[in-house]
Amino acid sequence: MNGWADSRVLHASGFLTQKFDLVGEAFAENFADGLELGASFAAIVEGELVVDIRGGFTDRAWEHAWSEETLAGIYSSGKAILALLIAHEAANGRLDYDSPVAEYWPEFAAKGKGQITVAQALSHQAGLCGFPDEMPPQDWLDWGAITDRLAAMTPLWAPGTANGYHPQIFGFLAGELLRRATGRSAGDLIRDFGLQIFCGMSSSEIARAAFMPKPPKAPDLGELNEFTKVAFLKPWSAAARVDREAWMAAEIPASNIHANARSLASILQPFVNGGRWDGGSYLTQEAIDSALKERCRGDDLVLPFELSWSAGLMRNINGHFGPNKKAYGHAGFGGSCVVIDPERKLTAAYVMNKMSPFLVGDPRALRLIDALYERLDS
């Protein structure tokens, strides 16, 4: 391992193996081009941590250095973690992708939702991209209020007929399935890993979280339709009128998980290493195959892309997660992303605090991922 530093990155730290020096170059170029405030990138290849670099600042005043202890909001990149947790329950026989959600959550069967399967819910086919009726936006911090509303909701399109991204509700679907299967919340299950990843933070963890400057402009959502508006643009489409600490302390699993890059790359390793975690078996191969198989493909009703979904992960048909079209990933609002490549036995994660308007395929992340693969193939 080589200690890493670059004069173009203030407070640069971490390490990378010599083979992956080009990743450090790409990271520094992002800073030199004025694209970053603070950031971190990590990659694990065939079980070896080959890149773990960071630099810049955690605050708007440029006073506090980004460190190993820094946590960043990863927004929808956290959906990949939920996909892993669901796969674990499938491996243990407590959930089945092809069974109805209502088998585990009987109240969910109301209003024509009785036949929506776990796999359909996790591949954004349930017709539940957001709540069409006005509600207090503070309710997103109240788990019971949201799950009760969700159980009573009528789908916005016929379930199973199309995919339409569920930005917030995905986390409550996955989280309530986990709670029904295990009796525990997603945040509690994540803490079991002992990593620097949190959904529902203590005051000491909140103190380590980076300030996240908002993007300079809104993301391009393409031609707006009612599904897009419900998912993203209503005043109640996401938590609002709450203070930062209350939002970070709540569990909103699809959008308020916080992590560092090394932990984020680490937690996803069972998808690429035969299901192992901490010396034991976490996933079976059958569960991995079920989690990663294509569940739907088509023009998304909410996002302006053709997408291919597994049970919670984007299949890399658009190259949003690097050059290997057989890889998987997820991106988060502002630029974070994870890459899961079973073929190359690779996981990687990029986290940052200077948010961009890219919905997926942020050029900063792609610069790093492309450099990683270039060295991987050299």
Image: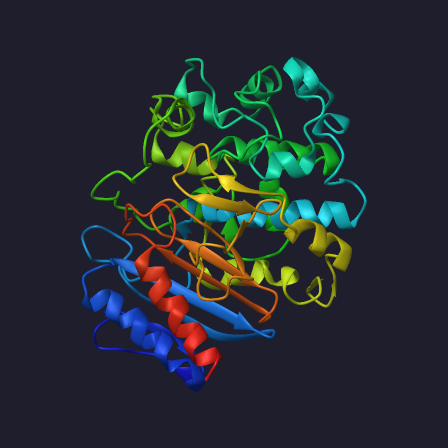
Q: Nearer the viewer, residue 357 or 63?
A: 357
Question: Residue at image x 34%, y 30%?
Answer: 243
Relative placement, left or right, of 227 versus 63 is: right
Residue 330: image x %, image y %?
48, 51
Q: Is residue 138 visible?
A: yes
Residue 191: image x %, image y %?
60, 49
Q: Nearer the viewer, residue 284 or 299?
A: 299
Rendered position, 252 above or below 331: above
The number of numbered discs placed on residues in the rendered structure image is 0
Q: Nearer the viewer, residue 309 or 206?
A: 309
Q: Nearer the viewer, residue 164 or 110?
A: 164
Question: Residue at image x 40%, y 65%?
Answer: 41
Relative placement, left or right, of 255 versus 25 is: right
Q: Is residue 12 visible?
A: no
The extreme right residue here reads: 93
Question: Toward which corner of the image does residue 133 lie, by quadrant?
Answer: top left
If the image is split into quadrants, where does the C terminus sit? Answer: bottom left
Question: Residue at image x 62%, y 34%?
Answer: 121
Q: Which scheme is used to colour this image of the protein?
A: rainbow
Relative placement, left or right, of 297 versus 290 is: left
Question: Toward which corner of the image does residue 153 lie, by quadrant?
Answer: top right
Relative placement, left or right, of 36 versus 156 is: left
Question: Toward which corner of the image does residue 28 lie, by quadrant?
Answer: bottom left
